[in-house]
Each structure stands twice: as structure tokens, then as C-alpha cells.
């Protein structure tokens, strides 16, 4: 949650810069500066390109209030006593295009269920994308396995399949690609490698609702797919998640594991009592009510974001030093949880990215610098120095692993150059997109003012 919390804090902090801008615009705009790409930068006291707020998120629909109240009054808050979670699972499976969906307490627990059921065990290794929300690292550690980072393709922001095979060894059990920011990973290449080396594939689709690859939705392309419905996500219920899949016996195992190991469906077999381990990772009925209501808008929102993103692509790419994301081979559409581009400071007279972001915020466009090289943050060493990891892996392996963390050149560079626009901005109108484009152009044209 830390990275998302930081993101939200930064978002609020930069929003107040925008709000300050609002105070000044009333007088400043009377100066009649009509060409947004010229004039004094707002960071230096000029007129901001934009003084309006962006759409807030999430969006509450009063139509959810009656069904929510009736669940609250019924006292049936737990999925086994009600029907709402079951209904939601059916609807979500239909939306994504899988046979089954299992609702969970969070995206993190969805990933934990998937890793466990697909056999990721203590002492295994899992190939992971380093450019992701920290939960993707954490779930591998929680399984007492080693997250082995493949490098990132800077153009697509997703795992570079060409860097996967060299990291596979006899301990490798799974590949965990992330459709990060909503951008589909190159799943055909990843699945081919997995097949060749007999590995399972778990998709972290926690930012990729309705993203499409090869005519199919993300979350249907590996052995199991995992989603998050946390408050900031496109389908929000405060907390929540789902595992999606087509294999009934796997999905029955998922259900059993998320429900204290109680027998479910095919797992029942001949057994009596508790034949499996498990945990409690269940979704509450009230969350399902909120989610079923939020689902009413998800397709229209996705189309709106797509249209605006394509418009941004067409304009931003013409600004020197601004390189919008590229879809990976086979990808059809992103979910645009974030709209990313790379900022090449060489084209801005070496204006540092942080200064560029400050200038953008002052113009009323709040952006974020994205994920850092989180493998240097301390959590990896904390794990490797634990008694458990010292038992599970040889000292030689752990030392080699430490060296491998220094061999992620493309990811290291991407973390220096990425800029993200938030998904709620993409729910605006064309004129809102023009504000973004005009602000970036204005900073480019007037970059020398900041040097
Ligand atoms: C949000 C997210 C998760 C975790 O989901 P939670 O519901 O917050 O536990 C995992 N992976 C990625 C890429 C995410 O964005």
C-alpha cells in the first residue's frame, strides 16, 4: 500500500498547487494570454494552463444505496449467508471472459491464492517484473519463494521476455508477468517460454480490467489471473480482489484455500474434514453490492479513457523528448490505469524530471514519477537476511541473487524517466486533454526559463 499511499499523498499535494493556481487565474487570465504555449511558466508566476480540478475518484452512484442498505439490514454480511458475492463472481467471470471467478479480500490475497494453488512453494523461484506495485514482490516473499526480476522493456513498461530465459534455473516454478499501468505484457512470448520450461503463469492483472491482448482480456491468458478492487482501482470497493480462471479443479482449489481449506466442489472427493491448508481471504457481501454497481460504468469508462489516450498519443509524440508508451506485440488495448510516457531530459536542455513535474503541476497538470528501483529499498535484504531464507537458499545463491539485482539496466533507466498521468484525467473531455498537451508544450517551449 505504501507506494499507492505516496501516490495519493503526492496527488493531493499537487492538487493543492492547482487550487492555488485557481486563486490567481481570475486576475491573470484577464491579461488575455491566448497562446498557451507561450508566456511565463506558472511555476515562475505566469498564468497556469489549467485552473479547473480533475474529476474525483471513485464515483458513488446513489442507485447502489438501496441494495447496500438491504444487505446491511439483513445481517447477512458474510458470503456463506448471502448471495451477493456469488452473483458478483458470476458477473465478473462473464465480464472478463473466463469460466470462473473467485472473489477475494484484496488483489494481494488473490495473488497469494493463485501462487499457492499453482504450487509455488518455499524455496522456489518466481520470475517477476520489477516495474510493479510492491504487492507483486511481497506475495512471492510471503510464499517464501525468491522473486527473480527480469528486466523491463522501456517502450512497453512491461517485462521484457528476452530477459526471462537466462534467469530460469531448476528452482524456477512460475512466471508472474504484470500488466502494469493497464498495459498488457507480451503474453504469447511469455507463455511460449513457460511451456518450454514447464512453468506456470500467473497474471497480475491488478491494474488491467478490460485490457486486451490477442483478442482476449487480460486475466484470461495465463493459468490464473488476479485482479484488485482497492479504492483507487477502476472497479473499486475499498478493498477486494478476484482470481479468474477456466480450469474448474484449479478454481475449486482456489475457493478451498481462500476459505480456511474447507472442501469445495471437486476438492471434496473422498475426504472428510480438512484435507487442505487454507486461510481466510473472503470478500464481504457489501463489497460485492458496491462492485456490481460499479460494474455498470466500467465499459464506458474504459472506452472513454481509450479515446482520450489515443488522442494524447497522437499529440504528445510530436513534442521532442516525450515518448508515449508502446503496446507490446500482440496487445490490442491498455486499461490506462495510468497513462505513461518517458521524459528525455536531453531534449529539455537537461531540465531534471522532478523540475519538469513541478512545472507541470503548477500548470494544473498533476503527474507522478512512478515506481522507483524498489529492489534497492531494503525489503529484499530484510528477506534474504531472515532465518527462513538462509535455510531455504544457499549463501552462494543469495549472493548471486544480490548481484542480479544490479543487472536491470533498462528498468533502472525507466524509473528515472517515467511520467504517469492518472486514470481519472482520462475520464475528461477533449478540451481537458488539450490542457495536458498545451502544458507539456508550454514547458518545452519555455524550458530555458527553468534552467
Ligand atoms: C493494486 C495492486 C496489487 C494489490 O492489490 P490490493 O488490492 O491493493 O491488495 C497488486 N499488483 C498490482 C500491480 C497492483 O496495482
Image (cartoon, rainbow, N blue to C red):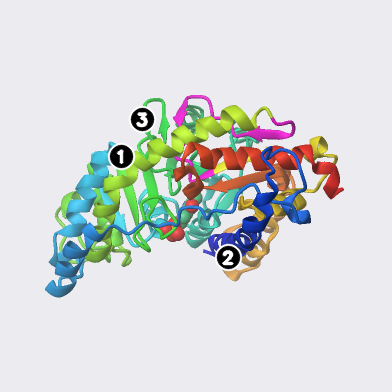
The reply to whether the magenta stretch includes residue 86 is: no
Q: Which residues are magenta?
A: 319-338
* Front position among marks 3 and 2: 2
SS at badge 3: strand
Q: Which mark is first along the chain, 3 or 1?
A: 1
Residue 136, given in percent of the width and then of the height, sits at 51, 53
Residue 228, given in percent of the width and then of the height, sits at 40, 54
Report the residue at 62% width, 60% height from top: 14
SS at badge 2: helix
The reply to whether the magenta stretch includes residue 326 is: yes
- The answer to whether residue 273 of the structure is visible from this angle is yes
**Residue 31 or 420: which is nearer the viewer?**
31
Q: CA distance from mark 1 to mark 3?
A: 9 Å
- Which residue was labeled with disc 1? 96
**Going by the image, does 309 lie left or right of 374?**
left
Q: Specify few, some or many for label 3: CA neighbours under 10 Å numbering under 14, 14-19, or 20 or more.
A: some
Q: Tell me: is circle 1 under 8 Å from ligand 1.
A: no
SS at badge 1: helix
Residue 379, given in percent of the width and then of the height, sits at 63, 64
**Which of the 4 image quadrants contains residue 105?**
bottom left
Report the residue at 60% width, 46% height from top: 420
- Which residue was labeled with disc 2? 9
Amino acid at each position: 500500500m505504501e507506494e499507492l499511499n505516496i501516490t495519493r499523498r503526492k496527488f493531493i499535494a499537487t492538487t493543492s498547487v492547482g487550487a492555488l493556481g485557481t486563486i490567481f487565474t481570475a486576475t491573470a487570465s484577464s491579461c488575455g494570454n491566448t497562446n498557451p504555449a507561450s508566456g511565463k511558466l506558472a511555476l515562475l508566476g505566469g498564468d497556469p494552463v489549467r485552473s479547473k480540478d480533475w474529476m474525483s475518484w471513485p464515483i458513488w452512484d446513489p442507485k447502489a444505496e438501496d441494495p447496500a442498505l438491504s444487505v446491511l439490514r439483513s445481517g447477512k454480511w458474510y458470503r456463506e449467508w448471502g448471495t451477493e458475492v456469488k452473483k458478483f463472481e458470476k458477473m465478473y467471470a462473464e465480464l472478463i471472459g473466463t469460466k470462473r471467478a473467485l472473489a477475494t479480500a484484496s488483489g494481494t490475497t488473490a495473488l497469494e491464492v493463485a501462487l499457492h494453488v499453482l504450487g509455488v512453494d518455499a524455496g522456489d523461484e518466481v520470475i517477476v517484473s520489477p516495474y510493479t506495485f510492491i504487492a507483486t514482490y511481497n506475495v512471492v516473499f510471503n510464499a517464501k519463494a525468491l522473486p527473480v526480476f527480469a528486466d523491463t522493456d522501456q517502450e512497453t513498461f512491461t517485462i521484457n521476455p528476452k530477459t526471462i530465459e537466462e534467469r530460469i534455473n531448476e528452482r524456477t516454478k512460475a512466471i508472474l508477468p504484470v500488466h502494469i499501468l493497464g498495459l498488457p505484457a507480451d503474453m504469447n512470448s511469455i507463455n511460449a517460454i513457460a511451456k518450454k520450461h514447464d512453468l506456470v503463469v500467473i497474471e497480475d492483472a491488478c491494474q488491467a480490467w478490460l485490457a486486451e491482448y490477442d483478442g482476449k482480456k487480460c486475466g484470461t491468458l495465463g493459468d490464473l489471473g488476479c485482479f484488485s478492487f482497492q479504492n483507487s482501482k477502476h472497479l473499486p470497493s475499498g478493498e477486494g480482489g478476484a482470481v479468474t480462471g477456466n480450469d474448474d479443479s484449479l478454481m475449486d482449489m482456489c475457493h478451498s484455500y481462500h476459505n480456511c481449506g474447507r472442501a469445495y466442489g471437486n476438492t471434496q472427493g473422498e475426504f472428510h474434514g480438512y484435507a487442505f491448508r487454507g486461510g481466510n481471504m473472503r470478500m464481504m457481501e457489501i463489497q460485492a453490492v458496491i462492485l456490481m454497481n460499479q460494474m455498470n460504468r466500467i465499459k464506458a469508462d474504459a472506452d472513454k479513457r481509450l479515446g482520450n489516450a489515443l488522442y494524447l498519443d497522437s499529440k504528445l509524440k510530436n513534442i521532442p523528448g516525450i515518448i508515449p508508451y508502446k503496446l507490446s506485440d500482440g496487445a490490442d488495448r491498455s486499461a490506462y490505469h495510468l497513462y505513461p510516457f518517458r521524459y528525455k531530459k536531453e531534449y529539455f536542455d537537461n531540465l531534471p524530471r522532478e523540475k519538469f513535474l513541478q512545472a507541470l503541476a503548477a500548470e494544473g497538470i498533476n503527474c507522478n514519477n512512478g515506481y522507483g528501483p524498489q529492489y534497492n529499498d531494503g525489503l529484499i535484504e530484510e528477506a534474504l537476511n531472515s532465518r527462513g531464507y538462509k535455510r531455504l537458499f544457499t549463501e552462494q545463491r543469495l549472493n548471486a541473487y544480490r548481484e542480479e539485482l544490479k543487472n536491470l539496466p533498462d528498468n533502472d533507466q525507466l524509473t528515472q524517466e517515467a511520467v504517469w498521468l492518472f486514470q481519472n484525467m482520462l475520464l475528461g473531455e477533449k478540451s481537458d486533454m488539450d490542457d495536458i498537451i498545451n502544458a507539456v508544450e508550454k514547458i518545452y517551449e519555455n524550458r530555458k526559463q527553468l534552467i
